[in-house]
Amino acid sequence: MVKACNVSHLWLFGILHLLVYPASNGYNTYFDRDTGPIGGLASPPNVTLSLGRLVQVMDLAALVLTWMVVPKVFVGVLVYQVASRLYSYHRVRIKALPWLSLVMVGLFQGVLIYAMIAALASQAIAPGPLAAIFVYLVASYPITQAYQMDEDARRGDTTVAMVLGTKGCLAATGLLFGIFLALAWAVVPKVEVLVLCLAPVLVAYTRLVLRFRQGFPLVYKDVFGLVVLNGLGVVAYAGIYYLMGRS
């Protein structure tokens, strides 16, 4: 894992979370034209041409800012942007290819981001953490599509969730998350802190499985809550690990 956090990492974090990721989600929304819950919106607004223009401005701003402050990862950010467009663009639509989209999420949202972080720290890419990060991203992918199957079917897409079904999504997420924890135990420093930070995710996931077995459907609110806990857990681990390294 990356041993040091510096100003360049903070710049990359800001560029990704304030520009690149929102633009990617906006581009996906532009082509999906969802009427049901998506991302952090329970009732998304109607898609207009202005959304497409805003996404383009954010993409350009991300590239310019990256070139100015963290040029070492400029190519990585550009590749991520291109990949996210191919994922959503209707003439390519990798999202509609279930297994390719699954691998793509693991590679570009996981492996590529890790490679950029390692590059900023001038560290070699370690295969163990690389595998753990790939599995971690892939684990959360099916369940985030589970409540959107009707929307995806309306557009003619075939997603991983549609292939697996709700029960299969829950099983796949649990299995892959378990594999991630096994890998993390071998390669992640201070792994006990990571497990503690992700404990709420395990509790929320167990609750989802139990409710589903009782006949309750998998709904947006529950899945989004799981995603939020997952993100907060990772951020908490990164913060604690950084502070422990400074002490």
Image (tube, rainbow, N blue to C red):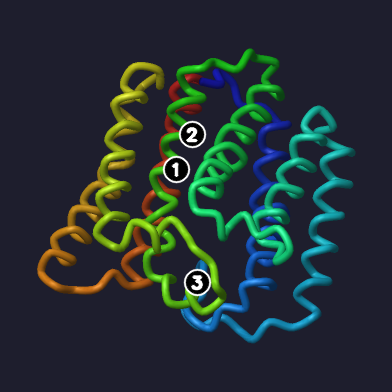
Which of 176/56 is in front?
A: 176
CA gap between label 1 and label 2 equals: 6 Å
Looking at the image, residue 191 lies above or below residue 134: above
User: Do tag 1 and tag 2 residues touch (Cβ < 8 Å)?
Assistant: yes
Identified by mark 1, the residue type is: Val
Mark 3 or 2: in front is 3
Assign a secondary structure to mark 2: helix
Which of 95/10 is in front?
A: 95
Mark 3 and mark 2 lie on one chain; the one further toward the N terminus is 2
Residue at point 24%, 73% (across, down) = 217
Q: Which residue is mark 3?
A: 152
Q: Residues within 10 Å of mark 2 (few under 14, many from 20)?
A: many
Looking at the image, residue 96 lies above or below residue 43: above
Identified by mark 2, the residue type is: Phe
Q: Residues within 10 Å of mark 3 (few under 14, many from 20)?
A: many
Assign a secondary structure to mark 3: helix
Looking at the image, residue 201 lies above or below residue 26: above
Q: Which residue is mark 2?
A: 134
Looking at the image, residue 42 lies above or below residue 27: below
Q: Left or right: where does residue 156 sit relative to residue 18?
A: left
Q: Which residue is mark 1?
A: 138
Mark 3 and mark 1 lie on one chain; the one further toward the N terminus is 1
Identified by mark 3, the residue type is: Asp
Please state the horizontal and vertical placement of residue 242, each as a whole percent of the image: 50, 27
Residue at point 71%, 52% (across, down) = 20
CA gap between label 3 and label 2 equals: 24 Å
